[in-house]
Image (cartoon, coloured by chain):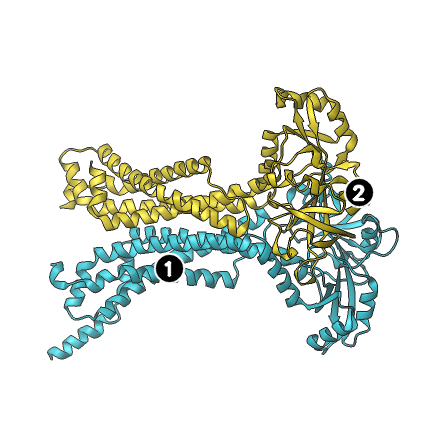
Chain colours: A yellow, B cyan
Amino acid sequence: MLAWRILTHQKGRTALALVGIFMAILLVFVQLGLFFAVPQGGMLLYDNMRFDLLLVSDQYEYQAQPGAFPLTEVDHVHAAPDVAAVTPIYFGVAKWKGGVGGVWPDLFVIGFDPAGHVFLPDSIDRQISVIERPDTMLVDDATRPIFGPLTTSRIVEIGDRVVTIGGQYTLGTGFMGLGVALANPSNFTRLFPGRGLGQVNLAPIRLKSGVDPELAAVKLRKLLGAGTQIFTRRELAAQETSYWTTRTSVGLIFGSGLLIAIVVGIMVVYQIVSTQVSRQLPQFATLKAIGYDDSALAATVATMSLLIVAAAFAPALAVGVWVYRLIREQTLLPVTMTAGHAATVLVAALAMAGMAALLALGGLRRADPADVF
Amino acid sequence: MSTASASATRAHLRPVPLAWRNLTANRRRLARSGAGIGFAVLLMLMQLGFEQAFFDSSLQVIRGLDGDLFLQSAHKYQFATQDPFSAAALDAAKRVPGVASARPLYADWYDVFWKNPSNGKMFPVRALAFDPDQPIFLFAGVNDRREELKSADAILIDRRARRFLGMNSAPVQSELNGVTVRIVGDFALGPDFQSDGSIIMGDRTFNCLIPGGGGKPPKIETGVIKLAAGADPIKVQSALEQALPSAIAVMTKPELIAFERRFQAAVSSAGPIFAIGTVVGFVVGMLISYQVTYTDVSDQLPQYATLKAIGFPTRFLLRVVLEQAALNGLAGWFPAWLGGILLYRLIGEVALLPMRMSLAITFLSLGLTLGMCLISAAIAVRRVIAADPAEVF
C-alpha cells in the first residue's frame, strides 16, 4: 500500500504531522465542547428534575428568566385525568449577608414542596426532613467561595431573615447565579414576603404511567388559560438551546471559534500532505510515466490524509476527555465528552482530510514526468 | 589584489538579505505558510478579542459615568447588583471640602420589564436613572434630552440593545412594568453578559416604575462625585471615607473599574475559556511554523552546507533561519491582523459586543506570533547546525 509506505518512510516527518493534526482535532473538541456546554449548563436544573411536561408562563425565555403564572393553573392541571403529580416551583433572589470580606452576594432561592420529590439528586431526597424545618435551607455545594463557609448549622442573614444552613446538596448552579439554595414554600414566603405563593415560576408535571407526553400536552393546552404554555422535555431542550445559541453571544463566540478551528485543521493537514506530495513528486511522476492514471495517485493522496487524521483522532479524543475535565473544573461549565461529540469531531476531521487532499492534488496533477527529470 | 577582490565580493555579498530571498524565492510556498500561520494568529486574535470585549462590555456603564470619585454600598460584590443607600449619605458627601458635586445614579437590573412594542413580549432590562438637573452620563444623546426626561413618562432607549427587545426599530411608545412610556430619544450602550439592553430615564419616571417606591424618593445606587478644580482625589477620597458611614465605599474611577474587572475575572469563566483558546492557537501556530521551517531547512540543506563550506559561521546560518521564521510569522500575522479588524467589526455589529483592535491586542498577538515562530524555528534549526558539508554532496 503506497500511502502507508510513504507515511512510514520518514517516521519523524509523519510523527510531526500527527502532532499537528492532533492539535487541530483537539482544538475542534475544545470549541465544540464549549459551544454545547453553555446550553447544557442552562439545562442543568431540568436534567436534575423528574417531570414529563413543564408548565410555564407564555413569557418564558429560559430557565433563569421564566416569567410567572397564577397558581390556579397548577390546580387545573392537577385535576386533569392524565396527571399523576404537579409541583409548583418558585424562584427568588435575596442578599446573602455573610459573604467573604463583608460583601452581600446574591443568592438564587428555589422554593418547592419537598414532598413532591421533584429533584433527582439523592443529596436532596435524603435531606427532606431538613428542608421542612422552619428558616432552614439547603445550599448547593457549587456555591462560590465568595459566600463564605457553607457548613451545616451556620446561621446567615438572608434578605431580612435569619436562616440556618441545614446542609449541602449536589446539583450545580448552572446560570442561576453564584449561589443557589433550596427552601420549602413557607420558608420561601418568609424570605420574600411581598411575593406570596400565588405566582408560580415553573410547574413540572408528572404523568400517569403509560400516558404519551405529546398527546397529554395537547390535551392540557386546551385546558389551560392564556398566559401559559406547556413544554415536553424535547421542546424544552430545543427552547433552551435556541435561547443560548441565538439570543446570546454564545453561539457566535464558540461558533466562530469552531469554524476557525476547522479551517486551521484543513490548513495543517494540507500543509503536511502537500509537503509530502512535493517531496515525492519525482516518484509520483514516475508512477504517472509508467501508466498509473491521476485517479490512482489521487486515491493515494486521499488515503494518506485519511490515515494521518485517523491516527491522530484517537489520542486527540483521549486528551480531549482530559481537557474537558480541566475546563469543567476551571469554569464549572458542564463540558462533557459524549458519543455525539466524538462522532461529530470525527466527521469534521475526515472532512478536513478530504478538503486538504483536494487542495494538495492541485500540485500533483501538474506533475509532468517529462519535467521532473 | 586577490584579497581586495575577495573582500569586495564579501562586501558585495554582505547586504544580501538571504532570509528575505529564501522567503520570496517560492511565492506559492510563502502564501501557503503565511495562510497556515495566519489562521493560527486569527484564532488567537478572536480569542483575545472576545476576552477583551467580555470585560469591556461589563465596564461600559462605569466608563459612561462622568465622575472622579464614586460612592456605593460597601456590601457590593459587583457593580451590577442592587444595594442602594440613602440620600443622606450623598448630602454628607456634598459638604466634604474638595467635592464640587455629588449626584445620584439610580439603577435596577432585575425589576424593570420592557415590552417589545412589535410583539408584546416582556424582557428585563437594565434601568439607569438620574436627576435631569444633575447630569451624570457621558453617553451621547442623553444630556440633550434632559428637559424631556423631566416628565414622568419619558425614557431613552438603547439602540445597540439586542434586537429581540425591539429597541432598534425606533419605536415612539412602549411599556415598562405595564406603564405606558414615551420614547424621547436614544443612546448607544449595548448589552453585556447580564443585561440585553438598557433604558435611561429621569428620576421621576424611575420612581413610578420601581415597585414599593411609594412616592418616596428612590434610593441611590451610586454616588457620582466631581472634584473641585485643583482638589487632590486621594485626599478627598480619604476625607469622604472619614465623613461617611463605613457601609459606604469610596472609589476612584480606576478603582471602581478594577473592582468590577476583578469580580468578572473571579466568577465568570471568560478568563480561562479564552485563555485555553489562545494557548491552543499558539500551539497550532507553533506546529505549522515548525513544519514550514523544517521543510524549508531540509530543502535548502545543500545550500546551507555550501555556505558553511565556504566559511560562513554557524551563527550566521542560525540568524538566517530565525530571521526567515520571523518574516514568515510577520507574513502570517499582518493579513491576520487586517482580517481581525474586519472580523471584529463584523462580529461587533452582529453580536453587539465592543470588539476593537486595541494596541494591547495588536502587540500581544504580534509577540505571540513572533514567539511561536522563533521557538519552533529554534527547534527546527538543529538540522542546519548539524549539516556537514562533506555529507551533503
The three-letter amino acid code for the residue at tag 2 is Arg
In the depicted view, which residue is nearer to us: A290 or A271? A271
Q: Which residue is drawn at 47% across and 47% down?
A: A325
Q: Which residue is drawn at 76% across and 76% down?
A: B98
Residues at circles 2 and 1 in contact by the CB criterion of under 8 Å: no
Q: Which residue is drawn at 17% across and 37% down?
A: A288
Answer with the quarter of the image where residue B144 lies: bottom right
Side of B107 relative to B88 (left or right): left
Percent position (x, y) of residue B105?
A: 76, 59
- Give the residue number, with chain letter if any, for mark 1: B372
**Label 1, residues with CA under 10 Å away: few <14, some 14-19, many ≥20:** many
Answer with the quarter of the image where residue B51 lies: bottom right
The quadrant in which the N terminus of chain A is found is: top left
The three-letter amino acid code for the residue at tag 1 is Met
Classify B236 as above or below B349: below
Q: What element carries label 1?
A: helix
Q: What element carries label 2?
A: loop
- Give the residue number, with chain letter if any, for mark 2: A195
Q: Residue at x 22, y 60 (%)?
A: B383
- Give the alpha-carbon distance from disc 2 to disc 1, as whole Å: 58 Å
- Number of callouts in the render? 2
- The reply to whether residue A255 is visible in this rendering is no
Percent position (x, y) of residue B291?
A: 30, 53
